[in-house]
Amino acid sequence: MTINQQQIDFDAEHIWHPYTNLSQPTPTFSVESAEGVYLHLTNGQKVIDGMSSWWSTIHGYNHPKLNEAIIQQVSKMSHVMFGGLTHEPAISLCQKLVDITHPNLDKVFLADSGSISVEVALKMALQYWYSNTKLSEQKRKQKTKFLTIKNGYHGDTFAAMSVCDPVNGMHSMFEGVLQKHLFVEAPSCRNDADWQASDIEEFKNCIDENVDQIAAVILEPIVQGAGGMRIYCPEFLRQVRKLCDQHGVLLIFDEIATGFGRTGKLFAYEHAGVCPDILCVGKALTGGTMSLAATLCTETISSTISSFEGGNLMHGPTFMGNPLACAVANASLELLQNSNWQSQVNSIESQLENELAECAQLESVADVRVIGAIGVIELKQAVDMHVIQPRLVELGVWIRPFGKLLYIMPPYIINPAELTKLTDAMKTITLEAC
Ligand code: PMP
């Protein structure tokens, strides 16, 4: 049924959209359907989605194989509790996740969203130390802090918020109630060629000084997403891994945005050739069809937690391992593995580099950066979403800037002409901002 004006008015009046002000909402556009890289708006317009619905729809919309997986599964069972019960879609999915991630990561917890997978990762790290009888009881209970770098983003739930950038991380109003963790500057070098020993100094000092309290380091490897769309060099991750090993601190990688090929490797940690102790994945896991995430960890972590007292990992959401979500995630991973995603992402990367480079010279631009299927123009001034969002739609694209960042991460199936339409729109906005 087509949406009517009354419903649109109801939406504006009653429904909170992500990060919006209900009194002065930024414009919302109604979507009728979506196909390939296109969103079909109710007003008849067709826009190219440069956001992959926030990193998730890597194969494009309305994919017949993903639809079929959902239809097949819905006719068997949409949901069944995961406590005491199991099913084939969840088992197949966890097998695939174990197969495609680093060999050390072989235990899987299925979560219902990215933020929850981060909560579970933090909980695993805390429970690991709480259960670690190699340490004295006093020492075990002291290891409750997380160390991270500024400009990070890990989700909107409370523990996840506490490891997001404390200043630009959108959550500063909750400062008083959030746990206090340890933050150091994010690395400024983008390539290993520019690496200097000083790039790890603050991190090294912080871990040295606080090792007795630190349960884990948590990072988005290679690309920091919503906290600034920053790209940093693999050497930083290698140094972090080394320091975590030397100090006996766990390492958590949040690959919720970067996982499943987005940066040109299946997982961004592959750029550095290091393995975390705990890994979070989500977003593109179901090809952008349903909410599902997962937290993987090593045998050392699971066996330590499991051998202490009750041994239970204390988490278990109602919709854990939802069969529909698992079935479509299986189909999405199969699609990915049988596709030429690597060359698709490489071509997107070269095209973004070629087409966005000229923007770096413009007066309004602070920086242009590209990695894999991610292209970012950082402006000198924040954009006015009330003006920019309708303008982008008028240009035939769906791009959702935040602050000073105009960025895209399109579906991997986008063709060169469609990608040019996105980069042209970015250039137009950038020129208009001059
Ligand atoms: N971590 C990262 C790196 C993310 O980009 C996001 C989502 N933007 C999250 C965690 C939270 O995921 P979700 O929105 O599914 O809760």
Image (cartoon, rainbow, N blue to C red):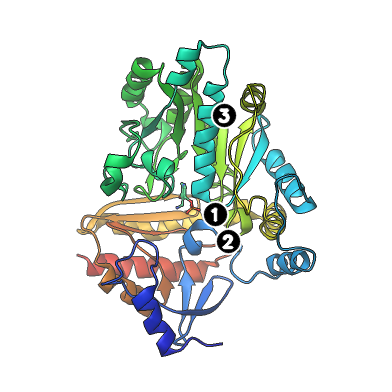
Confirm whether residue 256 shows in the render: no
**Disc 1 versus disc 3: distance between alpha carbons?**
20 Å
Dot 2 or dot 1: first in sequence order is 1
**Quadrant of image for the C terminus:** bottom left
Element carrying mark 3: loop
Q: Which mark is residue 230?
A: none
Q: Is residue 407 above or below residue 147?
A: below
Task: Residue at 31%, 48% (x, y): give it.
Answer: 171
Dot 1 or dot 3: first in sequence order is 3
Dot 2 or dot 3: first in sequence order is 3
User: Would you say the beta carbon of the disc 1 residue lies within 8 angstroms of ligand 1?
Assistant: yes
Element carrying mark 2: loop
Q: Which mark is residue 277?
A: 3
**Quadrant of image for the N terminus:** bottom right
Q: Quadrant of residue 148?
A: top left
Instruction: Tell me: 164 left or right of 132.
Output: left
Tell me whether the residue at label 2 lies in contact with that at label 1, contact meaning CB atoms closer than 8 angstroms: yes
For this rendering, which residue is in front, 101 or 177?
Answer: 177
**Disc 2 versus disc 1: distance between alpha carbons?**
6 Å
Q: Which residue is the site of mark 1?
A: 283
**Disc 2 versus disc 3: distance between alpha carbons?**
26 Å
Q: Which residue is the site of mark 2?
A: 288
